[in-house]
Image: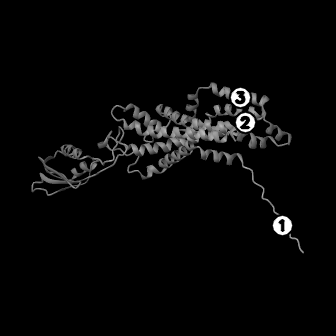
Amino acid sequence: MSVTSTNNKETPELGRSLWDDAKDRLKANRAAVTSIVVLIFITILSIIGPMLAPHEYDAVYRDYVKVPASLEAYPRQDQIEPAFMSVAKRARLNVESYQVVDGKVEAEVTSRREIDERNTRRFDRSDIFENTQIINYSEDRKSATVTADVQYMHFYFGTDANGRDMLTRTLIAGRVSLTIGLLATLVAISIGVIYGTVSGYFGGKVDLIMMRVVDILYSLPFIFFVIMLVVFFGRNFVLMFIAVGAVEWLDMARIVRGQTLSIKRQEYVQAAEAMGVESGGILKRHIIPNTLGPVVVYMTLLVPKVILLESFLSFLGLGVQEPMTSWGVLISEGARNLQGAPWMLIFPSLFLTSTLFALNFIGDGLRDALDPKDR
């Protein structure tokens, strides 16, 4: 009789890390998830949109200055005839008859002198007509038939005071504003977290000296730094706002220092020190991960702060320069034209407001997800 013994080996369950818990908690936050989707959508739209838009961001249409936003194509039927008559008058042509059939203008014109074929350029220079031809000349060439195709265009967000498409400019402005905000924020967060963590953890004279440096930098006027950055980096707004981020780290350093002073007194940090873990390992594994909640919240506040700062610098002539633009610049222009062209303010404001709300909800969601007290 044989006895068979079966050894059942149970597979040990793997522990869940802080990041796994944070990811699940973030997914459960509907407002944060929706905001992430909105922010990703705005980012993709800002990157790809200008390449798919029907107009260039710096293209000027003199015949479409401050036209309202519309899903219908321009020009409207009541705009074609006045535009044709205006061009014909500048060409010193008298319009005897006029008709529009299937998007093509056909007009009988006369003149006191011979009609020059080069007059077609006057019509083609217009944003409304193209492929202009002068045919059926009379024997004395003082009368002829002018034909031209009507060039239809769409301006879904309307145009600005210079006749530029607001849709393309809003999307290209989003690319600029988001790039500026993210670059400056990443630089500020990186410097501020490292600086504040080292200062708070080591304490003593190290903390005293490092914080006095921060106090000295706080006392210097910000515009002084801006002028210095423009001198060193020129008009390259990307490099300039990376340097601006290198100035905006002061608040972050103080926040992280305060968190570090509290965290380094916790039992798990003291246990790590007793086990002989090096300072670098403690900072990397225990201090910095537990400061991520306030860091993320501050980051979501710093991005809009930098975007608004860019608007202020552009107003002073130190930031984004024409024909390039940003949401801050468009909103500033729209505010000046609010009475006659409200769409110039509405669409950039919607994009900027949606981005700011999304960043705030994401910050709240990440703060809750990364808070170790709520695990």
Q: Nearer the viewer, mark 1 or mark 2?
A: 1
Disc 2: CA contacts within 10 A as few (<14), some (14-19) or many (>=20)? many
Q: Which mark is residue 277?
A: none
Q: Secondary structure at mark 2?
A: helix
Q: Position of residue 370 (x, y in %)?
A: 66, 41
Q: CA distance from mark 1 to mark 2?
A: 54 Å
In the figure, residue 350 lies in which quadrant? top left
Q: Quadrant of the N terminus?
A: bottom right
Residue 106 sits above or below residue 208 on the image: below
Viewer-closest of 97 and 271: 271
Disc 1: CA contacts within 10 A as few (<14), some (14-19) or many (>=20)? few
Q: Are marks 3 and 1 in contact (CB under 8 Å)?
A: no
Q: CA distance from mark 3 to mark 1?
A: 65 Å
Q: Position of residue 199 (x, y in %)?
A: 74, 33
Q: CA distance from mark 2 to mark 3?
A: 12 Å
Query: Residue extending furthest top?
Result: 219
Q: Secondary structure at mark 1?
A: loop
Q: Which mark is residue 211?
A: 3
Tell me the kind of residue under disc 2: Thr
Q: Residue at horizontal 69%, vertical 29%?
A: 213
Disc 3: CA contacts within 10 A as few (<14), some (14-19) or many (>=20)? many
Viewer-closest of 68 and 85: 68
Q: Can residue 277 be seen at all in this image of the molecule?
A: yes
Task: Please give the residue where the numbered disc 1 appears in the rendered image.
Answer: 6
Q: Are marks 1 and 2 in contact (CB under 8 Å)?
A: no
The answer to which of marks 2 and 3 sits earlier in the sequence is 2
> In this image, 279 relative to 45: left or right?
right
Q: Position of residue 236 (x, y in %)?
A: 53, 41
Query: Residue extending furthest bottom?
Result: 1
Task: Please give the residue where the numbered disc 2 appears in the rendered image.
Answer: 197
Q: Residue at horizontal 14%, vertical 58%?
A: 136
